Amino acid sequence: MKKLFAVFVGLICVMSACQRGPNPKDSLIATGNALQNCNADGVDKYIDISSVINGAIDVAAKQEINGLSKQEIMGVAAAKMIIVPIAKQFILEGIRQAADSEYKEYAKLVKVKEYKILTNKDGIATAKVTINFEDAKKFAVDKNLVPEEAKPYMNNTETTLMLKMKQSGEYWQITEITNLDELIKKYAPLYEEQKKKKAEMAKDIKAAMGLSQAICMSQQRYFLVHNVYTNNFEDLDLDFVDDSGDPVQGSSFVGKGVTYSINNEGEVIIEGTKPQKYVIKKECFSGMIMCQDEDESVCNVVVPTMNI
């Protein structure tokens, strides 16, 4: 009788396990493992990336963020059919590239403090995931993996994500970040501050570029007359005064806090707000320009608007 009872209990356990089906928490943990190991295929399996991006665009379109016009946001929303597939591939490719870089070690240091399933009914679940970035932040800063302008976004070392999930056969997928509106509002002031700083830098550099145009034209005239380039401002037909109010002497001067110099190659070099460096090549009279900075963010603002 005892043996029969044991078999019966065992059978009930097996049957209940079969009926229970996949657990959304197991899929959440698998998602975390895929992200930490930079496993793009795993991320693609456990996250419905297209749905998450679609939802993110819809949420962003409702936000009021200074420096980001409503027309820009609505334009992105209207072009979702084109943007979403490209964004998905960009994300997956980024994960693949991270697998062979120091960013993989960074990802492994991101700690999940809590996985919690809040509701689970009819193939739809909601979940809460609390993530701690403290160790990862220290590693990223020490290894110089974080651009200077991104550091303010890392002040908060803990983030909570509220997620929506759906059952997909033998596993579950994350389909939406339901507290994204709250997260955007949290970080919007930082975005606005960075946008303002970038606009100020762009304004200063545009003024510097305008002066460089005059330098280039003078270089062109000097070259046509003498058939050589000059590395001395005194040779050019321009009246330059530096910030001290004195006439320019030699091959460099400072105007409005921006340093201008001409090197032996005949290149006009403009050094503005650090770490930006702007170079007008000696072929400047033909309109060639090269803008260099750490992340190209300011250059992307300035160069397309210049007609040098």
Image (cartoon, rainbow, N blue to C red):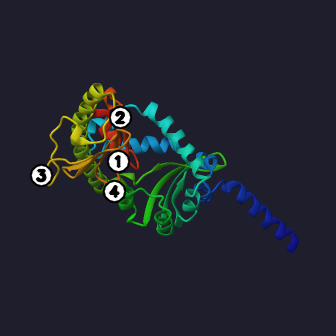
In the picture, residue 290 is in which quadrant?
A: top left
Location of residue 164 with respect to 88 vertically, above or below: below
Residue at 18% in and 47% down: 248
Dot 2 alpha-carbon crowd within 10 angstroms: few under 14, some 14 to 19, many 20 or more:
many
Pick whichever of labels 4 and 2 is earlier in the sequence.
4
* Residue 154 sits in quarter: bottom left
Residue that mark 2 sits on: 282
**Which of the two discs, 1 and 2, sits closer to the camera?**
2
In the rendered structure, the answer to whether residue 275 lies left or right of residue 141 reads left
Badge 2 element: loop
The location of residue 104, given as percent across then percent down, is: 58, 57
Whether residue 48 is visible, yes or no, is no
Q: What residue is rendered at 55% in x and 60% in y?
A: 107
Q: Earlier in the sequence, mark 1 or mark 3?
A: 3
Viewport quadrant of the C terminus: top left
Residue type at the position of mark 1: Lys
Q: CA distance from mark 1 to mark 4?
A: 29 Å
Mark 1 or 3: in front is 3
* Residue of label 3: 245
Residue 187 image label:
4
Looking at the image, tell me whether mark 4 or mark 3 is earlier in sequence order: 4
Compare residues 280 and 105 and report the one nearer the observer: 280
What's the CA distance linking mark 3 and mark 2? Answer: 27 Å
Q: Which mark is residue 277?
A: 1
Q: CA distance from mark 1 to mark 3?
A: 24 Å
Which sits in the foreground, 120 or 102?
102
> Residue 272, how many percent across, how many down?
28, 49
Q: Amino acid at mark 2?
A: Lys
Whether residue 155 is visible, yes or no, is: yes
Estimate the spatial distance between the alpha carbons at disc 4 and disc 3, rounded to whole Å. 44 Å
For the residues carrying marks 4 and 3, which lies nearer the camera in this image? 3
